[in-house]
Image (spheres, rainbow, N blue to C red):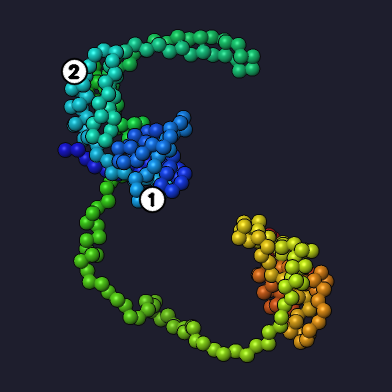
Amino acid sequence: MPREFCLHLAAHRTGAGTCRVSKAAAWFLKLHGWSVIKENRGGCHLQAPDGLVVGKTICLKVTAPTDEEIIILANEIRSVAVPGVRVFRPIFDFPAIYTSRRIMQKTVTDFDPLSEIVLAENHYTYEEQDRLVVGLWEIWRTDVCWNKEGLAVLHRYSNREFPLPDPTLFDAYASRPLEIRTEPLLNPGCEIYMEGTVEVLELDAYERNSSARRACIAHYGCRCQVCGFDFWKSYGEIGREFIHVHHLRPLASIGAEYRVDPIADLRPVCPNCHYMLHRKSPPMSIIELRNCLATAMHGRAGGM
């Protein structure tokens, strides 16, 4: 009886439902309903069947002959094969190519890579024995050769063969009644904390001038003036022009409207440094926080 297993084929996704694969992988995919868009030296561009999502790996269920079936096929082809003529005969989902005994010639040329002068030419003559190749080298392949006694010898080269998932794997869970827990799962001795209570707070809000913010960023840029962090360089387009603006004179300490100089009174800082500046009251200066950062970094480097 033939056997079934899964082949994991590498793929490069090129679009919605399309991918590029090797020509060897394309052989199996075409058998499973994939259509060829174009073919070139680098491989094949295929369109997946409707509704199939293409990922980095494509898993195919294939049917392969057993070792006994391969040997029977090999002996059958060999008994009727014409010397020097290749025989192609697919078996289940795999191609099978039989090559009869033949004399081969090979020339090896040695040359100087600098002067490109040919130093020597060696001619070799060798003999290729009868051979049946089932499958494709990159995916799954089994070879059959014959020894001096005329007995078939099988060699398997397989690195992408995986067992089929067990269809009964989740049967035991499907038959169990659904359990609905009304209490949270807690570790023994774990204390419960409550969050989400609505509270009404009375706060004094101080209006920020958006034009002053833009002028500050236009002058200093979007790099943090403490640590030098740049959100655009670290996060890409989503971080473009993102930065906090710190008031060197806290608005809460002034308590009234005042004329703000965007260059003298404001500095762009990252959220982390902004919070650190306000860890003290009154807030730390830019220079003080820079010194704290430098001292901490020097201490870590000295401890290594």
Q: Earlier in the sequence, mark 1 or mark 2?
A: 1
Kindly tell me whether residue 112 is visible in this rendering. yes
The location of residue 162, given as percent across then percent down, is 31, 44
Q: Which residue is mark 1?
A: 53
Nearest the eye: 74 or 200? 200
The residue carrying pointer 2 sits among few (fewer than 14), some (14 to 19) or many (20 or more) residues within 10 Å by Cα, namely few
User: What amino acid does circle 2 point to?
Assistant: Ser
The location of residue 134, given as percent across then percent down, is 28, 29
Nearest the eye: 222 or 16? 16
Residue furthest toward the left? 1
Answer above or below: position of 267 versus 144. Answer: below
Q: CA distance from mark 1 to mark 2?
A: 46 Å
Nearest the eye: 171 or 261? 261
Camera-near label (1 vs 2) is 1
Residue at image position (35%, 81%) is 183
Answer above or below: position of 118 versus 196. Answer: above
Q: Quadrant of the C terminus?
A: bottom right
Q: Which residue is mark 2?
A: 79
The location of residue 91, given as percent across then percent down, is 23, 31
* Secondary structure at numbered mark 1: loop
The location of residue 136, given as percent across then percent down, is 34, 31
User: What amino acid does circle 1 point to?
Assistant: Val
Kindly tell me whether residue 149 is visible in this rendering. no
Residue at image position (22%, 56%) is 168
Residue at image position (44%, 83%) is 192
Residue at image position (63%, 90%) is 202
Which of the 4 image quarters holds residue 58?
Answer: top left
Q: Are marks 1 and 2 in contact (CB under 8 Å)?
A: no
Q: Is residue 231 left or right of residue 147?
A: right
Q: Quadrant of the N terminus?
A: top left
Which of the 4 image quarters holds residue 103?
Answer: top left
